[in-house]
Image (cartoon, rainbow, N blue to C red):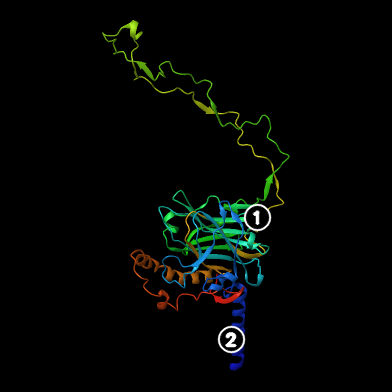
Amino acid sequence: MAGPAPLLKVRAAFLLAFFLHSASSGESRAAKVYFEERFDSEDWTSRWVHSECAGADGPTGRFEWSAGEWFADEHAQKGLRTSVDRSHHCISARLPSGNAFSNRGRTLVVQFSVKHEKQEFTFCAGGYIKLLGSDLDQKRFDGSTAYKIMFGPDICGHDMSRIHLIFSRNGRNLARRPEIPLAYDDASDGFTHLHSLVLKPDNTYQVFLDLKEKSSGSLHEFWDFENTTRDDPTDSRPDDWVDEKRILDPKSEKPSYWVDEQYIQDPAAHKPEEWDDEEDGSFVAPTIDNPLYRGPWRRAQMDNPEYRGEWRPRQIGNAAYEEEVYSYSDIGGVGFELWTVNSGSVFDNILITDSWDHAKAEGVELRKLFVKEGEAKRRWSEGLPPAGNASSDSNDSIPEKSQQTHEQSQETTPE
């Protein structure tokens, strides 16, 4: 009869196999945090560098360290705030210790918050972040600087309100078509909003606004990445190719009853008795709308019997095609390069990681603070003092503001 020792060995082997399977299948793993910035202290200036480039309208504006004119918790909500109307603002930071990374084989999550505070008549300003290479010259950072990904809101009144998601690939900046729509009131209501981008190794993406999905799908479907085939440059359209689908019907003739004279002389008009032909000239009756007018006659159209369809050049293999378009190497910095008509936008809570679960968990806690802004704004607009430190009631729920080092590990639930 078997004793307890063999049974314990069987159980131990089973548990070992279970945990090995869980680890290999990714059911539980540590999140990598490549970059995190909360602007919690004045030493942010040791990490962030203002560009010295001049904009089209003069020197670039400076970002200031501020939570804005009103806030739920001033300390927790301090960030980079644009300070000059009608100006460029350019600033960037390198990853800690210069540790550039590649997201190949891993999920990439980019998340940040922005509050467009000033709403005078209408709002117009960019609100997007750029992922940059490690070769970045921070003091020369401007709109011409190459980037990897550009992501975030771009708003100028009700006529232009969208979420940019632009990928730089082989020297081309590829924007999503169609653009990701953004309701004007969803991002320019004066409150803080959280923007999140998730790129996955299966070449799909998700965009979230305040943790609610705004857009998702295939990268190959919505961006003009290289196709598997390309046009044969040696192929040309034949001279006898007919691509006119419809033609005028040669048998079509205007009916004899068709009236295309829009105006006629009024048959009821009579020359006034006082009319003097010598002094007033020959009398001409005034014109009126022709009651029989049917509009201009147009010859009927018919299908072109010689139509051959839209000509397309012969397709050949495309050596530039890449199946894997989600990944980037040498991600070494982040930056804001913005044109602002309205100043007062506050950028904060920047996070670059490989775990959406980790980013979402932080976002959930941040949203607990953001929802208090309505009352804070009301008190500010009425000239009342702040209600107090909003975080005093929630020190256990709001993540401590800090700037994390690369590859900080934290156990998360499965992706």
Q: Is residue 252 above or below residue 41?
A: above
The residue located at (45%, 65%) in the rendering is 68
Q: Residues within 10 Å of mark 2 (few under 14, many from 20)?
A: few
> Percent position (x, y) of residue 365?
46, 72
Name which quarter of the figure residue 330 lies in: bottom right
Count numbered badges in the picture.
2
Q: Nearer the viewer, residue 183 or 258?
A: 183
Q: Earlier in the sequence, mark 1 or mark 2?
A: 2
Residue 149, above or below 78? above
Q: Which mark is residue 346?
A: none
Query: Does the rendering let one see residue 2?
Result: no
Residue 239 image position (x, y, % from top left)? 68, 30
Query: What secondary structure is found at the residue carrying circle 1?
Result: strand
Q: Residue at x 31, y 13 (%)?
A: 267
The kind of residue on which mark 2 rests is Arg
Going by the image, does 90 lie left or right of 183?
right
Q: Secondary structure at mark 2?
A: helix
Alpha carbon separation for disc pair 1 and 2: 52 Å
Observer-nearest residue: 116 or 251? 116
Judge depth for marks 1 and 2 and give the one in front.
1
Please give the residue where the numbered disc 2 appears in the rendered image.
Answer: 11
Q: Nearer the viewer, residue 88 or 396?
A: 88
Image coords of residue 250 (percent x, y): 54, 21
**Which residue is denoted by mark 1 in the rendering?**
169
